[in-house]
Amino acid sequence: MQGMVMDKKRQTVIFFFVGIAVMMVGLVWIISQNNTAVVHEKPTVVVSTFALYEVASRVGGDAVEVHSIVPLGSDAHLFSPNPTDVVKISHADLFIYNGGGFERWVEPLKQALPTTMNVVDMSTKVKLLGNDPHYWLDVDNMIRMTQTVDKACSILRPAQSAFFHRNAQNYIAQLQQLKQSYAQGLSACKNRVLVTNHDAFGYLAHANGLENITIIGLSSDEQPSSATIAHVIELVKTRHIKTIFFEELISDHVAQTIAQESGAGVQSLQPLENISEDALKSHQTYLSLMGENLTKIREAMECR
C-alpha cells in the first residue's frame, strides 16, 4: 500500500513538471511567432490572487485593464495555468504574482517570459512571517502592496502617475480605517485563540495579538493525522473555544469533525486568496470581506 501511495505521488510530480515543460515550450513558440509587440489601448495587468486583483483595480481604476488568471470560486493553492493563461500573461504589460512559494508554477514560467517584461514578485515588497505566503491579511502589507502597484502603474504610464497616486492614497486611507476597526474591535475579548482548519490566517492573528492554532499546515490539500485531530479537540475543550473556523472555498470536513467532538460551532473565514463569482457580482471587496471576518471573529471570541 505504501508503495502504491509513493507511486501516485511520483506520478503527480511527474505530470506537474511535464505540464510545466509543455507550457514553457508552447510559450516560447508563441513568443517567437509574435515578433511585433502587442499594443494595448490601456495597460494590461495580470495578477494571481484576489488581493492583488483588488489592489491593482483600485489603483489603476479605469486607466488599466486588470485580469486575474485564477478562475473564480477555485482554490488558488491548486491552480496551474493552461495555455490560454500563459498567452494572457505573456501579452500583459505587467504581471504581478504573490510569491513567497504560493504559486509553484511561476518560476518555470518566468524563464520563458520576455526579459523586457514588467514582472513583480509582491512577496519581496512586504513584511513576511517565515514561509507563510498569506501576507495580505496583515493590513499593513496591503498598504505596502498598494504603494508598490502605484509605482508599477506609474512606470507603465508616467503621464497618469498623478491619477494612480491619488487612487492609491484614497485606498490606503480606507485600509488604515480597516486596521483601526480591527484594533478597536479586538481590544477586549474573552478568548483570543483563533482556531482554523488551514494555516492561512497567521498574519491576521499576528497583526491583532491573537493566538493562532491550525489543524493543517500551509498546503490546503494536506490531511491531518488522527493524533493532530485528537490534540485539537482536547485543546478546544480545555480552553473553552466556541468556534472552529474553516477557509472558504476549501472543504470544512475536518473542522466539522472537530466541532462535533468538542461541542464547538463552525464558521467560515475568507482568506481572500480568491472569491466566488457570486461574491464578485455582489461587489464584495477586500474591505467588505475583511469587515465580515472581523464580525465573525468578534462573535467567536466574545469581544466587547
Image (spheres, rainbow, N blue to C red):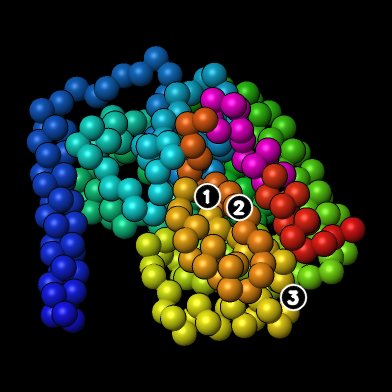
First reached walking from the N terminus: tag 3 or tag 1: 3
Check if residue 255 falls in the magenta segment.
no
Mark 1 crowd level (few <14, some 14–19, many ≥20, 10 Å Cα): many
Q: Quadrant of residue 6?
A: bottom left
Residue 220 horizontal/vertical position (percent):
42, 61
Q: Note whether residue 124 is visible.
A: no
For the N terminus, the image quarter is bottom left
Give the amino acid at mark 3: His
- Marks 2/1 in contact by CB < 8 Å: the verdict is yes
Q: Which residue is drawn at 41% across and 79% down?
A: 225
Q: Is the magenta stretch mostly helix, strand or loop?
A: helix
Q: Looking at the picture, does residue 34 appear above or below residue 177?
A: above
Residue 283 is left or right of residue 303, and the answer is left
Helix, strand or loop for disc 1 = loop
Give the amino acid at mark 1: Glu
For the C terminus, the image quarter is bottom right
Give the amino acid at mark 2: Leu
First reached walking from the N terminus: tag 3 or tag 2: 3
Residue 16 horizontal/vertical position (percent):
19, 57
Q: Which of marks 3 and 2 is in front?
A: 3
What separation in Å lies between label 3 and label 1 (alpha carbons)? Answer: 24 Å
Q: Which residue is drawn at 47% across and 85% down?
A: 227
Q: Magenta residues, as a range?
A: 279-291
Q: Nearer the viewer, residue 170 or 303?
A: 303
Residue 294 is left or right of residue 267, and the answer is right
Q: Nearer the viewer, residue 141 or 272?
A: 272
Q: Mark 3 points at which residue?
A: 240
Q: Name the residue under label 1.
A: 248
What separation in Å lies between label 3 and label 2 (alpha carbons)? Answer: 20 Å
Q: Mark 2 points at which residue?
A: 269
Q: Which residue is drawn at 13% across and 75% down?
A: 4
